[in-house]
Image (spheres, helix red, strand yellow):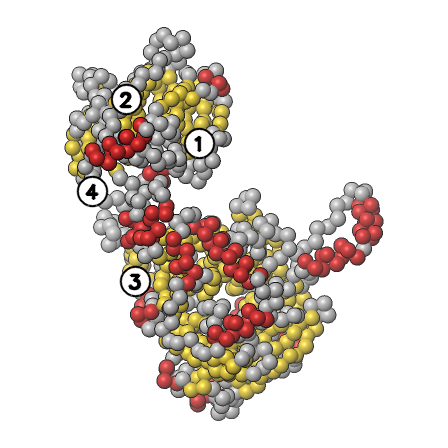
Amino acid sequence: MQCYTEIAPPTAVSHAVHLPFIAPRAHNLVVARNSLLQIFELKSTVTGAAAAESASPLLDAEAVDLPLQRTEHTAKLVLVGEYPLAGTVLSLARVKVLNTKSKADALLVAFRDAKLSLVEWDPETYNLHTISIHYYENPDLPGLSPWSTELKDTYNFLTADPANRCAALKFGVHNLAILPFRQRDVFDEEDDFDMDAQKDARMQDANGTAPEPKTPYSASFVLPLTSLDPTLTHPVHLAFLHESREPTFGIIASSKATAPSLLPERKDHLTYTVFSLDLGDKSSTTLHTVQGLPYDLTSVVPLPSPIGGALLLGSNEIIHVDVAGKTTGVAVNEFAKSSTSFSLKDQTDLALHLEGCSIELLSQDSGDVLIILNDGRLLTLTFTLDGRTVSGMTVQRVAAEHGGHVLKSAASCISNLGRGRIFVGSEDGDSVLLGWQAAGKSGALGRKASEVGTDDDMDVEEDEVDDLDDDLYNDTAPAVKKITAAAAEPTAPGSYTFRIHDTLPSIAPIKDVILHTDAAAQYPTTGEIMIACGRGAAGNITALNREINLTNLAQIDLPSAKGLWAVHARKQAPGGITADFGEDTEANFSVDADYDQYLVVSKTDEDGSENTVVYEVSGKELEETSKGDFEREEGSTLSVGTLAKGTKIVQIMQSEARTYDSGKLGDCGLVFQPN
Amino acid sequence: MTLVSSVIAALFSNPTKSQTELNMEQIITMEDEDGNEELRIINATFADPYMLILRDNSSAKLYQASGDGEVEEVEADGLASTQWLSATLYKSSASAEIYTFLLTHQGGLHVSFDSKRR
């Protein structure tokens, strides 16, 4: 029943994922605002004082190389499309499926009612296209009893295999729905095998029935976790791990419920088990188990190479489990000692509250990890490596002068966009595109500072350069050795600097509303609706208006004016420099072009005589000018326009058109009459 | 040689800020096919470097600003042979092509674009 009108769409960002969605090489960020899905594209702009002083883009680009190196590249998020969804988004995952319409990756969206939707981009309709919908709300699931928690109250989440073999939705008390995706080699095998059988099939189908198109996924199945291991009755969190031959996931679970009140009795009963899944047989193998984990662990964060394994995140400690099952942990506050007897390195002087924190891989090379606390402060987690195994971890605060305090609210989601950019979404305040730079290196950003060109192409080129470098080494072993040698020592504190590149404004959560429609709004401080929104340091008062308010800068009376034209006249490029004519007018209006501004007014006096007046615009003043040969007396002007990149002014009169120059240096214009 | 001399003259003549002088360069008169009467202009649209002018005898003429500083008429047979009710040029910042939209008296819409541009 729609008995309300939405006047402002949802602005709190709940989930974000980075994937090539629009095109195979695009850099898209898909942001879910609970029930609204937005697709962004990343564009790079050059900012900084030096850019404004540089000469017109028409001139030789090499001459402006020097000043531009002092500027910085800022990334901007550009909205491609937004789509309201029927349902609340629970999780987003990036999956690579075969034969998508855009040839890029697809998006798997999990909704609150145990529903999965596989979505791709359709470039023809410029819209989302649903490939398939899967729902698992089934009252006949084994293990469901009348007293077990309802589907909407359990902790449901989605996790996807980084190698795109399958995705798993954990729903209910301890059920796992697994959706396998077809892989390309499976297709090829079938094609090569039975050529004859295929031909026969086609002959049969010649009767008129078309062969069924294959779906990009195989049949999904529901696996109660207790069938993997009877002790997994209380799962906490699970995630698929990187770099494995079969789909492998690590799960934190216990056979008893966790409770801080029962610490004297139930201490360290959580276990972390890694299972390898066989999708064909629907069976699993246990790879290794870690027991005696602290009660407050909440999530599994898988790490790619060179570190590998997974991070187990708790409120008082962080534990790393590598691929062999070896653990290293660090305690970050005093409660860790009293709540667990797991061996942890002591960093309790940090006194951190890890509740509600978000973790994301910062740099693939060094394996460093970014942690955002629930008040927005930034921390880095760095590993000490002994050869290829992790021997220790260190948590370091990011100082305020390195951008450690740029964020004002907790993060609800965090996504690494690559090349030094991280998107941090928040439900308590504005969402932010954060850029980071490792100190001491100019980084990929500095290297390209001298190229002015189109920024989209530049991003693609950087990608290609990186790929070429990787291909030089056919086997990855020497490359991995290089990386781990560099990262053997923990990264020094203060080596990362963070900066905000772009913001997605948010008015969530709205605490209080006042309607102010009667009194006139004093733009910009008050508006028709005043709301108190944001949480904590991101709290603010926002004014909402239905219309754009204009500020009157100046008012000048032009009596009996019939027509008005503003003329941007530019001086012609000095002879010798060939400029392409007809380039887009944006170049004409760029900051660095040199302008003379004229206002041409066509007037009709009361006695019927028509004339034209030319005013020169200087700041907010209009000054009548009698410069030049502009035709003023003989007739009214129908229109005024510019040609030849703004260097020629054309005055259309009743029966002829006249062109005027706009300051060709030193040379006065020729009068040329065509016949 | 003339190019070099005008550059040198430019370097030594004017002060730093050049003023637009609004000196007249060309007068383009509106005449019909026979070259007899003067036609009134109904409407003119601009899309750098083109200018499309519609006259009161329902004929349209297309002009182009060439690189050497002159505005010349562009020969377009389809344009000259038809009677038009309305004509306009269109250029979007998304593409480099310039389109003309022309409406005939019978209500037909003709769209053409400049395909030689890059």
User: Which callout, 3 or 2, points at the residue further toward the start of the chain?
Assistant: 3
Q: Which residue is mark 3?
A: A540
What's the amino acid at mark 1?
Ile
- Disc 1 to disc 2, C-alpha distance: 29 Å
- Disc 1 to disc 3, C-alpha distance: 47 Å
Residue A472 pos. (x, y %) = 57, 62
Residue A310 pos. (x, y %) = 54, 75
- Disc 4 to disc 3, C-alpha distance: 29 Å
Q: Which residue is mark 1?
A: B98
**Residue at position x 47%, y 50% from top?**
A457
Q: Chain of mark 1?
A: B
Q: Chain of mark 4?
A: A
Mark 1 or mark 4, whichever is nearer to me: 1
What's the mark number on residue A553? 4
A665 relative position to A498: left or right: left
User: Which callout, 4 or 3, points at the residue further toward the start of the chain?
Assistant: 3
What's the amino acid at mark 3?
Asn
In this rendering, the answer to whether B111 lies above or below A516 is: above
- Disc 3 to disc 2, C-alpha distance: 62 Å
Residue in front for this viewpoint, B46 or A338: B46
**Residue at position x 42%, y 36% from top?**
B92
Count residues near mark 2 (Cα–Cα under 10 Å), then give few for <14, some for 14-19, many for 20+: some
The secondary structure type at the circle numbered 4 is loop
**Residue at position x 48%, y 82% from top?**
A392
Count residues near mark 4 (Cα–Cα under 10 Å), then give few for <14, some for 14-19, many for 20+: few
Q: Which residue is mark 2?
A: A670
What's the amino acid at mark 4?
Leu
State yes or no: discs 4 and 3 in contact (Cβ < 8 Å): no
The secondary structure type at the circle numbered 3 is strand
Residue A261 pos. (x, y %) = 46, 87
Q: In this rendering, does residue A674 appear at all?
A: yes
